[in-house]
Amino acid sequence: MKIYTTFGISAKAKLVYKFDSIDQLKLIWNLAKNKSYPFLVLGNRSKTIFIDKFSGIIALNHIKALKIKECKDHHLIYVGSGNNWSDLVKMLLNMEIYGLENLSFIPGSVGAAAIQNMGAYGIEFKDICEYVDTIDLSDGKIKRFYKEECQFKYRESIFKDIKYKKFVVVSVCLKVSKIWKPILRHEKLMRQFQNNVKIKDIINFIFKERSQRIPNPSVFGNVGSFFKNPTVSQEISGKIKKKFPEYRPSYFIVKNKVHAGWLIKRCKLQGKKIGGTEVYRNNPSILINHGYSIGKDVMRLSRYIICKVFKKFGISLEKEAILVGKYGEIN
């Protein structure tokens, strides 16, 4: 059976099932276990690239539960992990529940938002997370992880640890304050707005920014940022500032993080192409599919970029995209 992702490479798997309940997920998992097939749970597939035919069973998450509890000074939003994140944010804004506007227009599922600690424009998933509910595939029991237990870091959580792969995220609880304050920590927002900014201004600005930086997957297949922004030591940070004095370091290096796209640009790799995969000229942290890319193209180009950046800066780029091979995720 074929399965499609926003990158545009259609991949094949032995079997593909949809589930909209925990009981259905258990049935699919038991089928995979009994047949000794590799097992993979996917959401909206906006960060996934198939490098090879998957030799197991894929379970597509369609758990769409939604419940909103109004408390004295905040809202608790209990939402199924199969919901589309961008649709959720839009719905909450229409209900005048504010606080997630910086995370507008991000594709992907709610479950992926938790697993990857999704973030943008000065806010991360961890900032609004109350807890994450999972099912332990080893015994079929529900396990709740409160925010402190999730070990959230930059684009990381406990659920990406190989020891916790048996836990499938089935729902999350978000805590959103009733008292709205604009979050303007991101430099672009700080430069654009003052504290008296309106919500619609932030949303419009972010929509324009994302439209300019990230191509429409229907035109050029992509998964957004392919690489994480690496954390560097003070020593390397100082060397970068010294070597490129004509640039404002604060724009590129925040909390010892360097923008991956900037590093790739310094290596003059915009437009570098292998097969049908190319480094996007408008945002070099993104790889695009010209419509005929194959898995080997993605692997070769990403490795080439990693080698070039390391040779020039001594910095090892890590992928943010999820690459899936014959037996599962490729580390």
Image (spheres, rainbow, N blue to C red):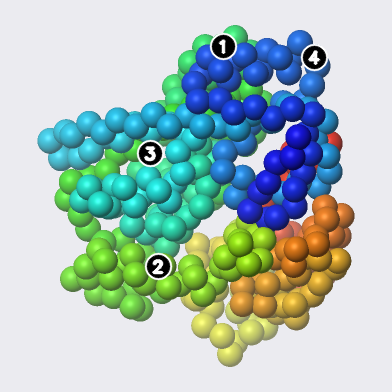
Q: CA distance from mark 1 to mark 4?
A: 18 Å
Question: What is the residue that sits farthest to the bottom in this orientation?
Answer: 246
Near-viewer residue (288 or 118):
288
Three-letter amino acid code of the residue under disc 1: Gly
Near-viewer residue (41 or 2):
2
Which residue is the site of mark 4?
Answer: 35
Three-letter amino acid code of the residue under disc 4: Lys
Q: Position of residue 113 (x, y in %)?
A: 49, 43
Between discs 1 and 4, the one toward the N terminus: 4
Q: Secondary structure at mark 2?
A: helix
Between discs 3 and 1, the one toward the N terminus: 3
Q: Nearer the viewer, mark 3 or mark 2?
A: 2
Q: Position of residue 283 (x, y in %)?
A: 62, 73
Question: What is the residue that sits farthest to the left in this orientation?
Answer: 72
Three-letter amino acid code of the residue under disc 3: Cys
Placement of the N terminus among the 4 image quadrants: top right
Q: CA distance from mark 4 to mark 3?
A: 36 Å
Q: Secondary structure at mark 1?
A: loop
Q: Is residue 324 left or right of residue 129?
A: right
Residue at x-position 83% and y-position 56%: 294
Which residue is the site of mark 2?
Answer: 206
Which residue is the site of mark 1?
Answer: 140
Q: CA distance from mark 4 to mark 2?
A: 46 Å
Q: Which mark is residue 129?
A: 3
Q: Position of residue 36 (x, y in %)?
A: 80, 16
Placement of the C terminus among the 4 image quadrants: top right
